[in-house]
Amino acid sequence: MGDLVQGKYRVGRELERDELGATFQGFHEGLDAHVRLYFLLPEHADSQAAQARLFERVRGWASTRDPNHRVVDAGTMEDGRPFVVFVEEGAGRAPVETVRTPVGPLPVMGTLVQGKYRVGRELERDELGVMFEASQEHLNIPLRLYFLLPEHADSPVVQAQLWEMVRGWASTGDPNHRVADAGTMEDGRLFVVLGA
């Protein structure tokens, strides 16, 4: 309890446990949002069969869009055990600070962002940014990525507008804009991850 996983997920109290893993309350430090974290139990850390069963279960949750298991991220802890992140419905807010991003091109289809988000086709544009289809690379979980337009990258006013828009999405629980994560690409540009 209190541990920070991947530098962004704060682990809270345990909620439940099953034969493979345990679910904990969690908090995304960067997004100021509540999440749930599911960790493979330590006794299964070296079991390829248990890890395969976990990832098969996660793919099932993602493909059925189970509202109790809205998968938004997955990763590996320092000890090698996999973990899964679920959206905590109706809780949390988006970040309040602005982030300076350098001017750079928009990603092209097939680009891998942060080593885990594969960019798909462009879905739509608005005055601030562009939305792309995407997937979580290792689990093939459908997501969407929203990038600030390159021409606005050096504008603190436009960045503030973007974060205001993202805060609105997060606080209203808008089902079309479920904020799951935010980060920077390898070139330092800001992006927002949304549920599909």
Image (spheres, grey):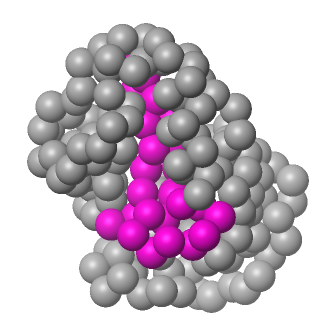
Is any part of residue 30 visible from this angle? Answer: yes
Q: Quadrant of residue 106?
A: top left
Residue 64: image quadrant is bottom left
Residue 113: give x, y in percent of width and height: 33, 34
Q: Residue 193: where, in percent of width, then height?
A: 43, 50
Q: Nearer the viewer, residue 178 or 153?
A: 153
Query: Could one spot residue 50 in this view of the protein?
Result: no
Q: Answer above or below: position of 107 versus 24.
A: above
- x then y, percent, for residue 83: 55, 61
Q: Would you say 44 lies left or right of 116 here?
A: right
Q: Nearer the viewer, residue 43 or 108?
A: 108
Q: Is residue 103 magenta?
A: no
Query: What are the residue bounds of the magenta stretch?
Result: 169-196
Magenta span has 183?
Answer: yes
* Residue shown at the point (26%, 35%) measured from the top left: 112
Q: Horizontal and vertical percent for residue 132?
A: 24, 48
- Asked whether, in this view, residue 173 is left or right of residue 35, the answer is left
Q: Along the horizontal axis of the image, is 130 left or right of 55? A: left
Residue occupying the point 54% across, 60% down: 169
Q: Is residue 95 above or below residue 168?
A: above
On the rendered structure, is 187 left or right of 74?
left
For residue 111, above or below residue 84? above
